[in-house]
Amino acid sequence: MSKQSIRYKRVLVKLSGEALMGSGEYGIDPAIIKRIALEIQEILALGVEVAVVIGGGNIFRGAGLARAGMDRVTGDHMGMLATVMNCLAMQDALEAIGTHARVMSAIRINEVCEEYIRRRAVRHLEKGRVVLFAAGTGNPFFTTDTAASLRAIEIGAGLLIKATKVDGIYSADPVKDPSAVRYPTLTFDRVLDERLNVMDATAIVMCRDNDLPLQVFNLGNAGDLLRIVQGESIGTVVRNA
């Protein structure tokens, strides 16, 4: 397969922390993280530059404990540290299969990973390394969805890819409503107007205002990530009209 077959030169993949759990209730499933690493390696081999943002919900959710009485800022800082743990696990999985990866954190943990510097991140990507962006934006009250949009814009990604448990954006929750309809394409304004909760509103607005297309797909469908970077209409594509 030729490198000319790819549609996007640089992408950012947003993974939820829950995506790493597999069938477990918390933590990281080694089989799941290895499969994701292999799929990332596959698109790297085509010449695609890959950045990744991972949530921390499989370990800790700051907003959840804030509702239970914990200080929100403290909870969000703990959530940021959970994303660092997930990124380190993904780095290890990638390196175990011979793929170079770097974890870059929005908060300084220099003994564990690199500090996020945009130009350095771009240089890593240009050298064929997977860059894993950890600790969100480094600020409380901002989700990892917003961090994914921000980092994708900063590095000049051609596409933000959001991995979920369903194969796109639906008119309602397809698990609860069998009559829910999947949208093959949407505009950012429609996602906001109809409150289709695929990402938080801040992340959607950032994508819209910076003309960054978003593609939502089911992480459980092996091979879909490869098909997306080749330009196939997988899941739901969200862009400006």
Image: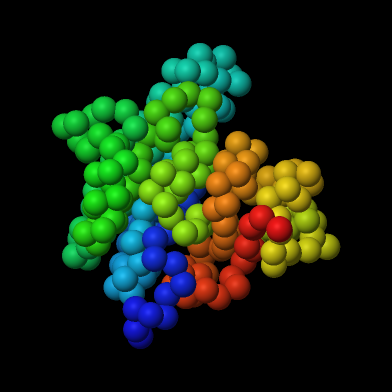
- Left or right of residue 67, residue 149 in this image: left
Report the number of discs: 0
Question: In this rendering, would 42 be left or right of 180?
Answer: left
Q: Is residue 226 left or right of residue 112?
A: right
Tell which residue pokes out farthest to the left in this image.
Answer: 111
Q: For residue 2, what is the image quadrant?
A: bottom left
- Between 163 and 21, the residue placed more toward the observer is 163
Residue at x 69%, y 64% (from the top left corner): 185
Residue 229 makes an appearance in the image? yes
In the picture, the quarter occupied by the N terminus is: bottom left
Q: Position of residue 179 (x, y in %)?
A: 83, 62
**Residue nearest the observer in this picture, 151 or 104:** 151
The residue lying at 24 percent from left, 29 percent from top is 109
The image quarter in which residue 42 lies: bottom left
Q: Is residue 132 above or below residue 137?
A: below
State which quarter of the image contains the C terminus: bottom right
Colouring used for the render: rainbow
